[in-house]
């Protein structure tokens, strides 16, 4: 007979979250280093190449955030099934998620092809357009592979096995470094491709990661009991619609946050190649720092979902959320201090252009200022995904990122002529408001979790 009991001690939950998150953080850092590699290679190829990659990357990631966020419905779904012991239902759910991922990838390929053909109306500086267009033409071929990779990665993460995220993340990096250099600068049979070559190298990396992950899931004994690829299932709208019901609001929320950064890059691209290149350096460093709280947020999603599946009640769910928050506060302190003390040293890795380096170094001071709000809002959003509370957070994110962040940034940066620094003040304001709103939402939503009913000794 089930009885209400006390969840595991807080220190135990912190350790569990840290162990789960460590490979996720490493994997996300590897993903962030992909942008770092692109930026460093582009920066040494030339300022115009770096500016083109900056704008092309922004346009690439803006629509990609919708499928990436939508597929984030997979971890809490499989985590709850795993927590409830319903292992036979994981495989069928995963196969429907693959159909969803494939459809989203094909749709995004078509959208990027259209965007690459019409950058002029965006108002991007004319000297940036050729490089950005070439980058998009190359990287779009990897998009279907990338959405399938996200689906497979989220399945593994949701089942508390996050090591593949790290391994395949760094594996992709190992492919991109030599391939990106060869295709950008030209080497042997490869002609010099500049920004376009970097786009093609990124697409090759994406297909390599996706094929390798699929082989791993099919052959690994760890996943054998889930029977992921034992039969062919046609697409079933009922299951796909359930994933969309949870995932689409996540996709919109992720897009609301990410588009704040992307549109900022596009607006700064109107100011010229020096401003665009400096912003690309600063935002790339900030994105690398963000990989840590993002990985912790994904681990918290899994831990919150698992706590619900195991019947630990409101106290267990909050404990999982606060464990993630504790880790985020520690990591963001470290990243903030590093940015404050080492911004000039970091910038010198990217470029030898004195004007670009000076502006990028000053922008990194603003990046240091938003480390805490950025980490807290990411962690809160991850905890809410574990609760499958995604619709209201979507509206809260829209209000914070766009009603506050973009409005203030555009007013200061463009309206009052403060330039990139004004846009970054807007980023800080939007992230701070999001941290307050999403954190408050988690506190309220976690109160509605049913009382604990099951023994939580199984971790």
Image (tube, grey):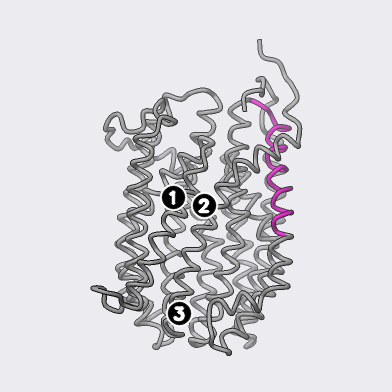
Q: CA distance from mark 2 to mark 1?
A: 8 Å
Say whether residue 302 is magenta: no
Q: Position of residue 290 (x, y in %)?
A: 60, 60
Disc 1: CA contacts within 10 A as few (<14), some (14-19) or many (>=20): many
**Range covered by the magenta-colored residues:** 311-332
Quadrant in the picture for the N terminus: top right
Tell me which residue sits at (62%, 43%) in the image: 300
* 325 inside magenta stretch: yes
Quickly name the residue at label 1.
168
Q: What is the quadrant of residue 424 in the picture? A: bottom right
**Residues at badges 2 and 1 in contact (C-beta under 8 Å)?**
yes
Where is mark 2, residue-wise?
27
Q: Is residue 383 left or right of residue 319?
A: left
Nearer the observer: mark 3 or 1; the answer is 1
Q: Could you tell me which secondary element the residue under label 1 belongs to?
A: helix
User: In terms of depth relative to the viewer, which is nearer, 404 or 124?
Assistant: 124
Counting residues from the start of the chain, the first of labels 3 and 1 encountered is 3
| Image position, residue 285 (x, y; %) | 58, 69
Q: Secondary structure at mark 2?
A: helix
Distance from the alpha carbon under mark 3 to that under mark 1: 26 Å
């Amino acid at each position: 007979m089930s009885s209400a009991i006390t969840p595991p001690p807080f220190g135990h939950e912190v350790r569990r979250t840290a162990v789960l998150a460590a490979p996720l953080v490493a994997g996300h850092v590897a993903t962030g280093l992909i942008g770092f590699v692109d930026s460093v290679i582009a920066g040494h190829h030339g300022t115009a190449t770096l500016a083109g990659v900056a704008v092309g990357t922004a346009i690439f990631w803006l629509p990609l955030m919708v499928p990436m966020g939508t597929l984030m419905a997979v971890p809490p779904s499989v985590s709850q099934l795993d927590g409830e012991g319903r292992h036979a239902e994981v495989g069928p759910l995963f196969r429907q998620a693959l159909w969803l991922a494939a459809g989203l990838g094909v749709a995004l390929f078509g959208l990027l092809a259209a965007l690459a053909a019409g950058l002029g109306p965006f108002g991007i500086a004319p000297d940036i357009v050729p490089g950005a267009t070439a980058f998009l033409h190359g990287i779009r071929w990897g998009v279907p592979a990338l959405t399938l990779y996200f689906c497979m990665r989220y399945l593994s993460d949701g089942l508390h096995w996050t090591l593949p995220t790290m391994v395949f993340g760094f594996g992709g990096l190992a492919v991109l470094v030599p391939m990106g250099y060869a295709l950008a600068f030209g080497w042997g049979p490869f002609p010099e491709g500049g920004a376009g070559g970097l786009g093609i190298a990124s697409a090759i990396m994406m297909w390599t990661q996706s094929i390798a992950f699929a082989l791993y899931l099919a052959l690994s004994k760890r996943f054998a009991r889930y029977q992921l690829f034992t039969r062919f299932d046609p697409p079933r709208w009922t299951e796909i619609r359930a994933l969309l019901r949870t995932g689409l609001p996540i996709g919109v929320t992720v897009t609301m946050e990410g588009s704040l950064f992307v549109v900022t890059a596009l607006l700064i691209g109107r100011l010229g190649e020096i401003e665009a290149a400096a912003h690309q350096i600063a935002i790339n460093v900030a994105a690398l720092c963000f990989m840590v709280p993002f990985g912790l947020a994904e681990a918290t999603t899994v831990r919150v979902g698992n706590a619900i599946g195991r019947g630990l009640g409101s106290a267990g769910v909050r404990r999982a959320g606060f464990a993630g928050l504790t880790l985020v506060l520690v990591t963001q302190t470290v990243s903030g201090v590093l940015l404050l003390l080492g911004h000039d040293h970091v910038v010198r890795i990217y470029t030898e252009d004195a004007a670009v380096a000076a502006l990028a170094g000053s922008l990194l001071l603003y990046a240091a200022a938003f480390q805490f709000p950025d980490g807290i809002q990411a962690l809160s959003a991850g905890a809410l995904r574990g609760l499958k509370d995604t619709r209201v957070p979507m509206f809260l994110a829209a209000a914070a990122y766009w009603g506050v962040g973009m409005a203030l940034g555009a007013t200061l940066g463009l309206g009052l002529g403060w330039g990139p620094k004004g846009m970054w003040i807007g980023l800080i304001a939007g992230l701070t408001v999001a941290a307050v709103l999403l954190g408050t939402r988690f506190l309220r939503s976690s109160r509605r979790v049913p009382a604990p009913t099951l023994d939580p000794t199984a971790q």
